[in-house]
Amino acid sequence: MFGIHDLTLFIISGFLLNIMPGPDTLLIMSKSASQGWRAGSVASLGIGSGVFVHILAAALGVSAILASSATAFTIVKYAGAAYLVYIGIMALRQKAKNNTGTDDAESASPLSSSPLSMRSIYWQGFLSNALNPKVALFFLAFVPQFISHDSPDKALAFIILGVIFNFNSMLWCHFLAVSTSLASKRLKVSKSLGFWLNKTIGIMFISLGFRLALTAKS
């Protein structure tokens, strides 16, 4: 239908790609550990919204511009890298504190200092994904492999496959959010360890930002 082929292979491949650790995984886990599963789920929704930007952009041909224009790719790449570094710096600036008196979602984790609003968490997820040009190029490289050359509507087929990919991604992301929150409660990590986990996550985001900035367009 719509020129789509090997749908089962597409779903399996997409799932394997989704479970590979990356910036999205780090963001979801850090928010789930610090503010509970709801925060992780909100971050997941932001990430999913960012994925839709790339799906629609690729279907409409905007991502092809990123693939062919070094200038456009560089601008978006540095914007995304800067935002990843910004998230890392915010994590490094968090301070450990006593969770006494906080609600369940916040007291579930040792990382729950200065909790962000759900709106801020959503936009963190959205921008960290929407500003990553490698995601756009991934969709251009991966999705067309499952669309026939003689498809009557390649853009529609692209969008359908993108929605399927994003739906499966959201299943994994929400599972990750809940499981991370539950693990954080069971482990009852100390405040000092939570402090250093924040620092580690911050350094990893900053490293990912620099890695993205230094990555050449392939």
Image (spheres, grey):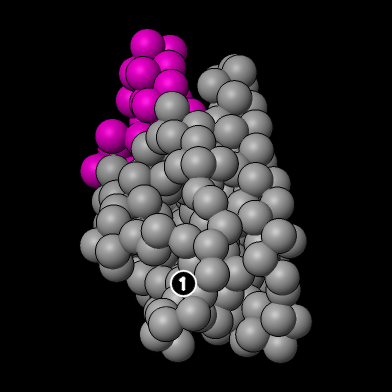
For the point 43% across and 17% down, which residue is it?
Answer: 74
Magenta-highlighted residues: 58-81
Q: Nearer the viewer, residue 205 or 172?
A: 205
Residue 163 seen from this side = no
Residue 206 seen from this side = yes
Residue 192 image point, x, y percent = 71, 60
Q: Circle 1 — which element? A: helix
Q: In the rendered image of this protein, does residue 84 appear above or below residue 117?
A: above
Lateral position of residue 137 relative to residue 42, left or right: right
Q: In the rendered image of this protein, does residue 168 appear above or below residue 178?
A: above
Check if residue 79 falls in the magenta segment: yes
Residue 162 image point, x, y percent = 40, 62
The residue wearing badge 1 is: 35
Q: Nearer the viewer, residue 118 or 104?
A: 104
Residue 128 picture quarter? top left
Quarter placement of the C terminus: top right
Residue 194 picture quarter? bottom right
- Identity, as a three-letter code, of the amino acid under mark 1: Gln
Quarter placement of the N terminus: bottom left
Residue 189 picture quarter? bottom right
Q: Residues within 10 Å of mark 1 (few under 14, many from 20)?
A: many
Lateral position of residue 116 relative to residue 177, left or right: left
For the point 29% across and 37% down, which residue is it?
Answer: 61
Residue 160 image point, x, y percent = 35, 67
Q: Main secondary structure of the magenta part?
A: helix
